[in-house]
């Protein structure tokens, strides 16, 4: 399995960062790019095909299982491993085996905005590593990230623990070598933000209408420090992120 690091700071650099700069944990889909516009439809289809292939079942049943396991476990692959003994790495490979580049859409000037945002930047995504890296490269953001932490690397005590797992968040903060209140999670999914805030992280909710259950929340929740609609707002927000 690949390392979670694209570039690993030295111990001295990590201490300096910890003293003076925040660590930004960015989600990927519907956060850094508009995945609801095109990519999610492709992923759903590819994942259904992968379920059918791995379990040797028809497409209708595969689609039902894909949705059921996603709702129950937060990731379809967890249900497939738990109930069917599917090889997680192989499933993630075949379910995301497509060219994402022409399907990626984001707000204008995103790379320029990232270059002006101080602090370390880490990608924390329930998506597979190769897909996540491909999207970052297409967005022009890959050079700005010190680390990619994908679902391939969210295995704890023999089990996959994706967001919003508290055990995962503890592991991430420990690996970063900083205090929780110096870490800022930027996400479109509220349940992930809620867990992060309960553990002392600061939280930014980037609202996307395509995110499941978004329409149910018209205002800012108590566990959200800042609510935005574009990433550029992180550079212009007049209200500081409280600790």
Image: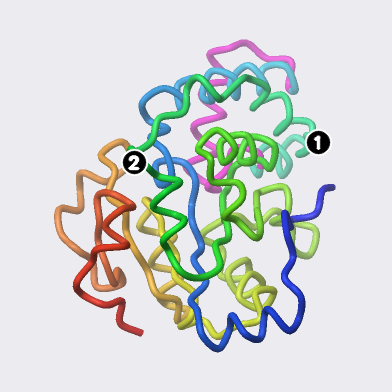
Residue 175's mark? Answer: none
Which one is nearer the viewer's eye here, 183 or 111? Answer: 111
Residue interval drawn in magenta: 55-77
Q: In this view, does 162 lie above or below 28?
A: below
Residue occupying the point 66% across, 72% down: 171
Residue occupying the point 49% across, 56% down: 26
Residue occupying the point 74% across, 15% down: 56
Which one is nearer the viewer's eye here, 84 or 146? Answer: 146
Where is mark 2, residue-wise?
212
- Residue 148 drawn in magenta: no
Q: Mark 1–mark 2 contact, CB under 8 Å?
A: no
Residue pushed farthest top? Answer: 58
- Rendering coords of residue 139 (x, y %): 50, 37
Where is mark 1, residue-wise?
87
Chief secondary structure of the magenta span? Answer: helix
- Rendering coords of residue 9 (x, y %): 72, 70
Packing grade of label 2 (10 A; few <14, some 14-19, many >=20) is: few
| Left or right position of 188 against 163 | left
| Left or right position of 64 against 236 | right
Q: Is residue 57 above or below residue 83?
A: above
């Amino acid at each position: 399995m690949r390392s979670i690091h694209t570039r690993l700071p030295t111990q001295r650099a990590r201490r300096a960062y910890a003293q003076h700069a925040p660590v930004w944990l960015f989600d990927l889909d519907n956060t850094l790019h508009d995945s609801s516009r095109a990519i999610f439809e492709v992923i759903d289809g590819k994942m259904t095909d992968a379920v059918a292939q791995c379990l040797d079942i028809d497409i209708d049943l595969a689609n039902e299982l894909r949705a059921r396991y996603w709702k129950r476990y937060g990731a379809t692959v967890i249900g497939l491993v738990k109930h069917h003994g599917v090889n997680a790495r192989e499933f993630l490979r075949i379910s995301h085996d497509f060219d994402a580049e022409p399907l990626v859409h984001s707000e204008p000037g995103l790379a320029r905005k990232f270059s002006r945002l101080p602090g370390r930047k880490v990608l924390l995504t329930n998506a597979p590593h190769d897909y996540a890296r491909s999207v970052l490269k297409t967005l022009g953001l890959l050079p700005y990230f010190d680390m990619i932490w994908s679902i391939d690397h969210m295995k704890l005590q023999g089990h996959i623990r994706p967001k919003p797992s508290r055990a995962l968040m503890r592991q991430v903060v420990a690996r970063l070598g900083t205090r929780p209140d110096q870490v800022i999670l930027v996400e479109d999914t509220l349940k992930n933000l809620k867990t992060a805030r309960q553990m002392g992280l600061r939280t930014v909710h980037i609202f996307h209408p395509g995110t499941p259950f978004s329409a149910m929340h018209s205002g800012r929740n108590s566990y959200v420090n800042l609510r935005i609609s574009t990433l550029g707002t992180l550079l212009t927000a007049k209200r500081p992120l409280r600790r």
